[in-house]
């Protein structure tokens, strides 16, 4: 785990609503089960001759170009009802990438992912791992808010998928946290329930992916925070194993 004062770490766990405890069962990195890997077949900038992770310019200019393309996107009907696109925030060279489902009302107004109470809890979850929010890149599978916070439609996810793949390829994270059922199912191309997806390591292309409960769900179901902490520990052990 990153160097962080133990007392401060415990304070963050307390802020998450998790009482101080020591896991009795070790959480080593576990292998993905058959069918849990997702292949990234084509980079959204294929017309430029690039493949994910192969020679992609991750300069600030390229980020600005991609964000401008997102801001003017009209690939699906959501562009007609959005206030702002929600591109993503955080470090462009982050080891950790968090991917949620879609912007809500607050995100649509502010143009930033994971704001409000759910965003505050996500920040505390990251701090419990010794990570500052600005060290992590945070995005959603959709860049525009679905009306009334309904679930994303397949066509909407497909329209945004190229943008997300480009972000993943440019960040090159060591791990992805899929926050919530919808994000996990779409990233892993499965309809399995989140209870079956969490607790083990999947892959998104060549990148390890761990499924965690969405912070908004944890606010409604605080007893599940212990499971969320286990999943965060699994993610951390996976990153540490990759860095050895």
Image: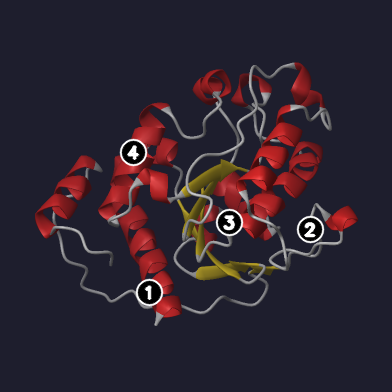
Q: Which residue is mark 3?
A: 171
Q: Position of residue 190 (x, y in %)?
A: 68, 58
- Residue found at x 32% / y 53%: 131
In terms of sequence position, does the residue under pointer 2 or pointer 4 come before the other? 2
- Whichever of callouts 1 and 4 sits on the residue coming sooner in the sequence is 4
Residue, disc 2: 43
Q: Is residue 40 above or below residue 122?
A: below
Q: Where does the image place residue 124, in percent across and percent down from the top left? A: 29, 43
Mark 3 to mark 1: distance in Å?
A: 18 Å
Lower position in the chain sequence, tag 3 or tag 2: 2
Which corner quadrant holds the C terminus? Answer: bottom left
**Disc 4 and disc 3 in contact, CB within 8 angstroms:** no
Indicate which disc, 4 or 3, sits on the residue closer to the N terminus.
Answer: 4
Q: Indicate how the structure is coloured in the image.
A: secondary structure
Circle 1 residues within 10 Å: few <14, some 14–19, many ≥20? some
Disc 4 to disc 3, C-alpha distance: 23 Å
Camera-side mark, 1 or 4: 1
Q: Quadrant of residue 217?
A: top left
Left or right, 91 with respect to 236, comes to: right
Q: Are marks 2 and 1 in contact (CB under 8 Å)?
A: no
Q: Residues under labels 1 and 4: Cα distance?
A: 24 Å
**Label 3 – label 2 distance at C-alpha:** 14 Å
Q: Which one is closest to the eye, mark 4 or mark 3?
A: 3
Q: Residues within 10 Å of mark 3 (few under 14, many from 20)?
A: many
> Of the residues under marks 2 and 1, which one precedes in the sequence?
2
Q: What residue is pinned by disc 4?
A: 121
């Amino acid at each position: 785990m990153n160097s962080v004062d133990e007392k401060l770490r415990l304070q963050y766990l307390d802020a998450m609503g998790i009482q101080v405890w020591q896991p009795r069962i070790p959480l080593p990195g576990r292998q993905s089960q058959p069918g849990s890997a997702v292949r990234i077949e084509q980079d959204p900038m294929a017309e430029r001759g690039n493949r994910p992770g192969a020679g992609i310019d991750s300069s600030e200019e390229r980020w600005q170009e991609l964000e401008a393309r997102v801001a003017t996107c009209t690939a699906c009907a959501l562009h007609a009802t959005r206030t702002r696109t929600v591109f993503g925030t955080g470090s462009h060279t982050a080891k950790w990438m968090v991917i949620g489902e879609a912007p809500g009302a607050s995100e649509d107004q502010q143009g930033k992912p994971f704001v409000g109470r759910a965003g505050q809890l996500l920040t505390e979850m990251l701090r419990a791992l010794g990570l500052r929010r600005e060290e992590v890149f945070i995005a959603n599978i959709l860049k525009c808010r679905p009306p009334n916070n309904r679930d994303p439609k397949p066509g909407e996810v497909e329209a945004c998928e190229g943008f997300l793949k480009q972000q993943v390829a440019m960040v090159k994270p060591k791990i992805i946290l899929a926050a919530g059922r919808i994000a996990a199912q779409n990233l892993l191309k499965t309809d399995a329930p989140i209870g079956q997806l969490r607790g083990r390591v999947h892959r998104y292309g060549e990148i390890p992916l761990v499924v965690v409960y969405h912070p908004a769900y944890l606010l409604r179901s605080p007893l599940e925070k212990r499971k969320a902490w286990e999943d965060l520990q699994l993610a951390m052990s996976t990153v540490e194993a990759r860095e050895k």
